[in-house]
Amino acid sequence: MVGQRFQCERRHALIVAQVIKLGQKLTDNAVAMFIKLMGRQFSQANSRKKQRHMDCRPDTAKALRMFLDTITALQSANDYGRNALEVLDQEVGWHRLLRIEA
């Protein structure tokens, strides 16, 4: 009877130990899965950000080209003593300057 009681307690202790071990393993796996999912989210967000920058490059290049033309026209007007607004209108065009603002 005493031997049987010890075997029963031993089985309960083994079951409790297995449950604790399983709980730890499940927690570790859940944390690892969370870390992977967060990493994937950051990677996707970074890819979207890079794509947005790549999509904006042509517009940025056009604006920079227009500003370079504007500076060149103003420098030319200053060098030759001409009216800056007239040179700017001839070389760049007001329509172009106004369109870039929008």
Image (spheres, rainbow, N blue to C red):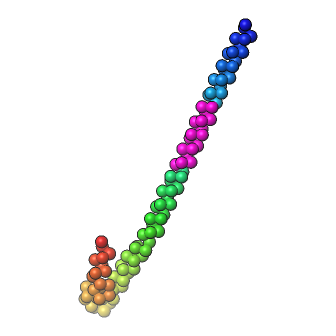
Rendered view: 91 above or below 16: below
Across and down, in percent, residue 24 comes to: 61, 33
Q: Residue furthest right?
A: 3
Residue 78 seen by the camera: no
* Quadrant for the C terminus in the image: bottom left
**Residue, x 52% and y 56% (percent of image)?**
43
**Residue, x 63% and y 31% (percent of image)?**
22
Q: Nearer the viewer, residue 40 or 100?
A: 40
Dividing the picture into quadrants, the one containing residue 87 is: bottom left
Whether 34 is among the magenta residues is yes
Across and down, in percent, residue 25 comes to: 62, 35
Residue range in magenta is: 22-38
Residue 18 located left or right of residue 73:
right
* Quadrant for the N terminus in the image: top right
- The prevailing secondary structure element of the residues shown in magenta is helix
Across and down, in percent, residue 83 comes to: 25, 88
Residue 6 located left or right of residue 50:
right
Across and down, in percent, residue 86 comes to: 25, 88
Q: Nearer the viewer, residue 47 or 93?
A: 47
Rendered view: 83 above or below 34: below
Residue 77 located left or right of residue 59:
left
